[in-house]
Amino acid sequence: MSLWYVLLVLLVGVERLAELVVAKRNARWSLARGGRVYGAGHYPWMVALHTGLLAGCLAEVALAGRPFVPALGWPMLALVVAAQGLRWWCITALGPQWNTQVIVVPGLPLVTRGPYRLRWLRHPNYVAVAVEGAALPLVHSAWVTAVAFTALNAVLMVVRIRCEERALGDPLGTGRAPA
């Protein structure tokens, strides 16, 4: 396994930890303003899936001897970087309303800046998650991890998006749920 790939996966892990720091700060902000948490039951599954993605990337490459194939790896690396850019654009656009949990603050308007101004793309952060979840393992040909994450993430996103849509429709809160 390439040392640089281990470093890449570790950097994505550090990025996830940075997200959790931002999410914790934003959760305090939201809850202090009367925010309500929705869908807490699926959240541990999301954490497990994202942790499994990182572990799977390293384990599959190490155990199955997956090679770095430049014709696949370099474009996938570019997609990983682009997904990170989209994710942080979402985080920045939503400001304190962004979170890894579904928390809606009553009375706040929908965010319509950044990628959220694109009405046809209601959940741009989930696009970033899907792209990264497929591309990160494929940087080093870990196709089993890419397929497994993509399939499990699709199931989880159905649950998550339904939860967000219900939260946004709740008469007690009309804020922009994190996406």
Image: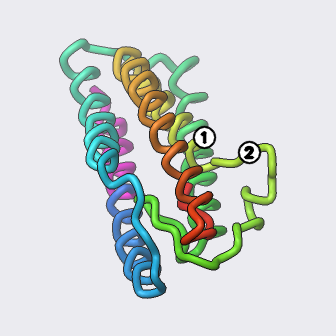
Label 1 packing within 10 angstroms: few (<14), some (14-19), many (20+): some
Q: Position of residue 135 (x, y in %)?
A: 50, 30
Badge 1 element: helix
Residue ID at (52%, 67%) = 98
Extreme front residue here? Answer: 171
Residue 29 placement: quadrant: bottom left
Q: 76 left or right of 53? A: right
Residue ID at (61%, 70%) = 175
Residue 58 is one of the magenta-drawn residues: no
User: Spatial distance from mark 1 to mark 2, Cα to Cα?
Assistant: 9 Å
Residue kind at label 2, given as amino acid type = Leu
Labels 1 and 2 touching (C-beta < 8 A): yes
Q: Position of residue 43 (x, y in %)?
A: 33, 50
Residue 4 is one of the magenta-drawn residues: yes
Q: Is residue 126 above or below residue 62?
A: below
Q: Quadrant of the C terminus?
A: bottom right
Residue 24's label in the rendered image is: none
Please give the range of residues in magenta: 1-15
Q: Position of residue 155 (x, y in %)?
A: 44, 28
Extreme bottom residue here? Answer: 32
Mark with earlier residue (1, 2): 2
Label 2 packing within 10 angstroms: few (<14), some (14-19), many (20+): few
Question: What predominant SS class does the magenta segment belong to?
Answer: helix
Residue ID at (21%, 26%) = 59
Extreme left residue here? Answer: 63
Which residue is under mark 1? 127
Foreground disc of the pair 1, 2:
2
129 or 96: which is nearer to us? 96
Residue 121's label in the rendered image is: 2
167 or 15: which is nearer to us? 167
